[in-house]
Each structure stands twice: as structure tokens, then as C-alpha cells.
Amino acid sequence: MDEREENFKYSCDDKALYFKRIECKSLCHKHNSISPDMVGLRQELIKKILGKTKSIFFIEQPFMCDYGCNIEIGENFYSNHNLLILDSDKVIFGDNVLIGPNCSFFTTVHPLNPDMRAKGMETSKPVSIGNNVWICGNVTVLPGVVIGDNSVISAGSVVTRDVPPNALAMGVPCKVLKYLQ
């Protein structure tokens, strides 16, 4: 694979990006430090962190992300503990999405070439999760993946490619096991 520098959009060493990450991580730290019984305060802080929310959602602590502004969650969104979203690009969740504990969503792509990695070059690809999706615990979703409506991703899966609607998918790498409708 011939990698060229023009394929990579930005440097992770960019000072403006660094300060945006620090600002977001500070807000995440505040959110994660709030007592679990102070739900209203936690919800208001999440609204400041994320790019777009609907009215009904809940994110268990701890929650971590890079920028926050690139994340959109739909109505009736629920995430269990330890949600990690590295959002150098858009990460969009539809309505009625359930996320199990210890799940990660990545948008950043690093070059295979070690010299380009040493320069801090990166690019990103968006992640999109449809409506009525259930992502079980310990799932990792890689850059550029689209998970279709009504799908279920089994625990421990690593999602490296798109999952069509109405699918039960599992494994490393994640593959469709059967269709649900």
C-alpha cells in the first residue's frame, strides 16, 4: 500500500486541536466527578460536551471523548459505563440506541508508514449507528463503519466493516450471523 502525505488531513500535534481536546477532556473529567445522584447536573454537562442531543438520553459515568462537538445522539440513547468515543470526525447515533459497558468508537486513522506516524499525520472517517441498535458490552467500532437500523452487535465484537440493517453480528472481526427480520 502506497501511502501519500496528502491522504492525511491533519497533524495530531496541531496546537488548536490540542487545546480543543484539553477543553473537552476537562468537561468529561467534571462530568465523571459529579455524584451519580446528581443526574440533572450530569445531563446539563453532557449537553455542553456533545454536538447534538435529543431530550431523553442517559450516559453512565465514566464517559470520555476527544472533542465532543462531533458526537450526535438520538432520542432514548443509553450508554452503560466506560463509553469512549474518539471523535476526530462525526459519530452519529440514531434513536433508541443501547450501548453496553466498555464500548469504544474510533474515527481516527493512523498511517501504516512509520515516518508519517512520527510526523503525527492522521485522517479520520465518520461512524454512524442507526436507529434501534443494541451494541453489547466490550465492542469496538472502527473508523468509517455504518451499523444499520435494528441491528445487534454481540459482546466482544470488533466491527471493522459496515453491518446491514436487521442483522445480528458478532466476532473478531465482526460478521453477520443472521438476519433478525
Image: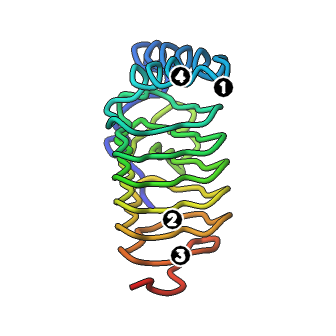
Which amino acid type is shown beneath numbered disc 1?
Answer: Pro
- Of residues 21 and 130, the one nearer the viewer is 130
State the CA–CA distance, disc 3 to disc 2: 11 Å
Give whichever of discs 3 and 1 has the lower sequence position.
1
Location of residue 147 (image quadrant): bottom left
Marks 4 and 1: CB-CB under 8 Å?
A: yes
Disc 3, disc 4: CB below 8 Å?
no
- Residue drawn at (34%, 52%), measured in percent from left and top? 94
Quadrant of res 146: bottom left
Between circles 2 and 4, the one closer to the viewer is 4
Mark 2, secondary structure of its residue: loop
Q: Are marks 3 and 2 in contact (CB under 8 Å)?
A: no
Q: Which residue is mark 1?
A: 36
Mark 2 or 4, nearer chain start:
4
* Image quarter of the N terminus: bottom left
Q: Does label 3 or label 4 sit earlier along the sequence?
A: 4
In the shown orientation, is residue 84 left or right of residue 121? right
Label 2 sits on residue: 160
At horizontal 52% and vertical 56% (from top left) the residue drawn is 141
Q: CA distance from mark 4 to mark 1?
A: 8 Å
Question: Measured from the top left, where is residue 156 in percent x and y?
Answer: 68, 64
- Dot 3, crowdedness within 10 Å: few (<14), some or many (≥20)? many
Which residue matches tag 4?
A: 42
Mark 3 sits on what residue?
Answer: 169
- Whether the residues at callouts 1 and 2 have beta carbons within 8 Å, the answer is no
Q: Is residue 154 above or below residue 30?
A: below
Among the two numbered marks 3 and 2 on one chain, the one whose residue lies closer to the N terminus: 2
The residue positioned 34% from the left and 41% from the top of the image is 90
Of the two numbered discs 3 and 2 in the rendering, the one whose residue sits closer to the viewer: 3
